[in-house]
Amino acid sequence: MARDFSWIRPEPWGIHVVPADCWIDPSRPVDRALVTHGHADHARGGHGHTFATPATLAIMKLRYATDEGAVPTPYGKRLALGGGVYATWIPAGHVLGSAQILLERAGERVVVTGDFKRRPDPTCPPFEVTACDVLITEATFGLPVFRHPPIEQEIAKLLNARAANPQRCVLVGAYALGKAQRLIAELRRAGHADTIWLHGAMERMCRLYEDWGIDLGPLRLMSDAAKGELAGSIVVAPPSALNDRWSRRLPDPITAMASGWMQVRQRARQRMVELPLIISDHADWDELTQTVIDVNPAETWITHGREEAMLRWCELNQRKAKALALVGYEDEDD
């Protein structure tokens, strides 16, 4: 008998798990929300109950000052939601605490990836391929032009720029949740043991990562630096701080930005970025398509991203697929 998966319904403001009356990453307050990770376009306050990994709940408490109704859901624990629906949170490899959500009902399996990547990341558990009938996948970088280089190459570019300009500093724009901590951890893995300086907006999230066992090495606030101390240093700040008054204190900074969007030269020029670093926390085109191949679902549902190209790829490869029209999901966390 053909399956229609009518028990899981895409709505403009989120994915509705109908028999359990709960929502995945809803963009408006609901009674029961299943949250994949802590970025603001997926995790919001105001829900009656929020089901998420313990690390994601800690991030939400820090960012949104809310923990009422929090229900910790560790990786691998199968949770009964009601209506014959069970949910399991599975590592997504995106940021600390990020998860795919496996939904099961009457022998049918649906995986919602949330945001994910398949490259190694020292700050979070790796993505796990999970068999299912329906794969609901993001497509942020769902165009063939997006093929991210090895992160070691981009970290080497950063360290080489620092070494070649000892009287300057390198100011790196990186989003405060996930990208900044991954950047720092990769610098440590490459052997950079010096103090890394932080804009004040980065400190609390970095300390939270450390509380969860992620070693980021010596970090100091840029506001504590003595005159001349920042020459030859790396400073990490929010992208919004790259060209504002705050950066004028720095010694002739080399302006860099870590983002998958730095592959688009126009974006780098718009932000006046001297050193674009193509470092993404999302799957690129090859990872997206390989994931569909590896999971081999009966259907692929594509959301929040470049849906048309992924849809066309599925059609050309004789794979049943459809694009979802969800709202409120952005690419600014990359």
Image (cartoon, rainbow, N blue to C red):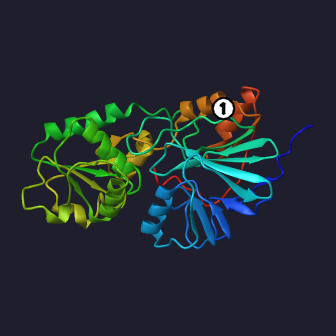
User: Where's residue 138, x and y in %?
Assistant: 61, 45
**Can residue 38 be seen at all in this image of the molecule?**
no
Q: Which residue is mark 1?
A: 295
Q: Residue at x 9, y 47 (%)?
A: 167
Q: Residue at x 38, y 54 (%)?
A: 212
Q: Is residue 142 left or right of residue 38?
A: right
Q: Residue furthest top?
A: 317
User: Where's residue 208, x and y in %?
Assistant: 36, 59
Of 69 and 180, the residue lying toward us? 69
Q: Is residue 169 left or right of residue 102?
A: left
Q: Is residue 64 left or right of residue 79?
A: left
**Can residue 306 be seen at all in this image of the molecule?**
yes
In which quadrant is the N terminus drawn?
A: top right
Q: Is residue 307 left or right of residue 243?
A: right
Element type at mark 1: helix
User: Where's residue 50, x and y in %?
Assistant: 60, 65
Q: Residue at x 25, y 41 (%)?
A: 188
Q: Is residue 153 above or below residue 203?
A: above
Of 332 and 1, the residue lying toward us? 1
User: Where's residue 189, x and y in %?
Assistant: 28, 37
Q: Which kind of residue does numbered mark 1 sit on? A: Val
Of 115 and 274, the residue lying toward us? 115
| Number of numbered tags placed on the structure image | 1
Q: Residues within 10 Å of mark 1 (few under 14, many from 20)?
A: some
